[in-house]
Amino acid sequence: MSVSRRVFVKSGGLALVSLGLDPLFLARAAFASYHPLPPLAASDRPILVCLFQRGAVDGLNMVVPHGESLYYRERPRIAVPASEVVDLDGHFGLHPRLAALKPLWDNKSLGVIHAVGSPDSTRSHFDAQDYMESGTPGAKSTTDGWLNRYCQHDREHDDTPFRAVAFGPQLPRILAGSAPSLAIDDLQAFGLRAPQEAARDRLTRAFEELYAGSATGLLSSSSQEAFEAVQLLQQANPAQYRPDHDADYPRGRLGRSLQQIAQLIKANLGLQLAFADVTGWDTHVNQGASEGQLAARLAELGQGLAAFAQDLGERLRDVVVLTMSEFGRTIRENGNIGTDHGHATAMLVMGGPVNGGRVLGRWPGLDPASRFEGRDLAVTTDFRDLFGEVLARHLGATDLSAVFPGFTPDPTRFPGAIRG
């Protein structure tokens, strides 16, 4: 059975769509329905959760340099007032709609890397996102993503179909490649439990739907991964999940994705890498300051991350959450009370292993003489050095040059996001 074969699985009825199905494929489906896998044992394996802020988040309004007067001169209408900034260290502060994250900063489980980004100067969303997910800035020919390459070269945790999971309708660029991975659009749909006879009926309907080309809810890179995933999810019964410690996730796709990631972590199914998109950051018009378009997106992000940490409780000790965005926004606001495509941005790291309570990276300042191309915040931390540090110091990766071809992240350049 070729691992390149695309297999789609729709929860309750195992609705499968594949290219070139054969009798062996169908036999595996039938066998899987009546022979559930044994559950995985609880594990303290390290987990990385990546959130991609697609659209280029304004890092200067997310993590505000309120101690720098140029920030207010360049943004007379959209600067966050100093009196409303959630101060972090006297110079930087969180946007007020990220106030839910301040306790995590105070207990050292939240850190900020500022002036981080790509060495490539493109201002194209498509190209910059592709470069950040492939891990090869400037090279369009790369066929796989850096998270998938990590899985290819580190096989220690490949004993589960849930090693690498994206939450959405398709596999993202960052998980594309030869290592098995899953994309799950709705975890709740997999929580069905039924007698064996009902399971047979569902399987029959699944094969009928198979030839009808029905819609799908789980995408896997191999049939074996798909069947094991369905069995394990049905045993975990995610439809019955209730967040712990009174955690309250925000409504919307981000809150749902973070809750489902927490579910998989606590179900002990072997999750090591999780990925979710957070869209809506392209704020060219009416961006707003402490209120408005950007503020609404940041509120959802802050509430989601805070709920995730609260829900996990002690399990957060093994988890690192990393935010990323393809580039930042211009230092100066534009004529439409927004910001245009820039260069460097800010990224957040959260979790038990994080060297938190600090704004990391070298701050270049907002002075025109230090700006990139005279207009943008300069990149002083290559995103591959940040991502490489998380892989090496958190996940234990030993060959970063294989994960980032043509570039070797250097520990002397690591921003210090993960405790040694």
Image (cartoon, helix red, strand yellow):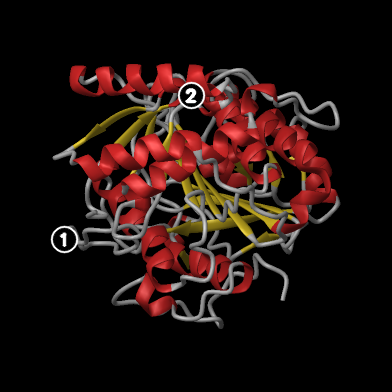
- The reply, left or right, for residue 135 in relation to residue 19 is right
Q: Which residue is mark 1?
A: 141
Is disc 2 surrounded by few (<14), some (14 to 19) or many (20+) residues within 10 Å?
Answer: many
Whole-percent x and y of residue 229?
Answer: 48, 42
- Residue 272 or 338: which is nearer the viewer? 272
Find residue 311 and report its image quarter.
top right
Nearest to N terminus: mark 2 or mark 1? 1
Q: Is residue 74 visible?
A: no
Whole-percent x and y of residue 187?
Answer: 53, 29
- Picture residue at 62% right of the left edge, 41% below the top: 264
- Picture residue at 34% right of the left edge, 16% below the top: 205
Residue 287 disc label: 2
Q: How many marks?
A: 2
Find residue 249 and report its image quarter.
top right
Q: What secondary structure is marked by label 1?
A: loop
Find residue 117 and report its image quarter.
bottom left
- The reply, left or right, for residue 266 in relation to residue 323 is right
- Picture residue at 75% right of the left edge, 30% below the top: 84
Q: Is residue 121 above or below residue 215?
A: below
Q: Quadrant of the C terminus?
A: bottom right
- Picture residue at 57% right of the left edge, 65% below the top: 390
Q: Is residue 391 visible?
A: yes
Q: Is residue 210 above or below residue 358?
A: above
Q: Is residue 20 above or below residue 412?
A: above
- Residue 50 or 55: which is nearer the viewer? 50
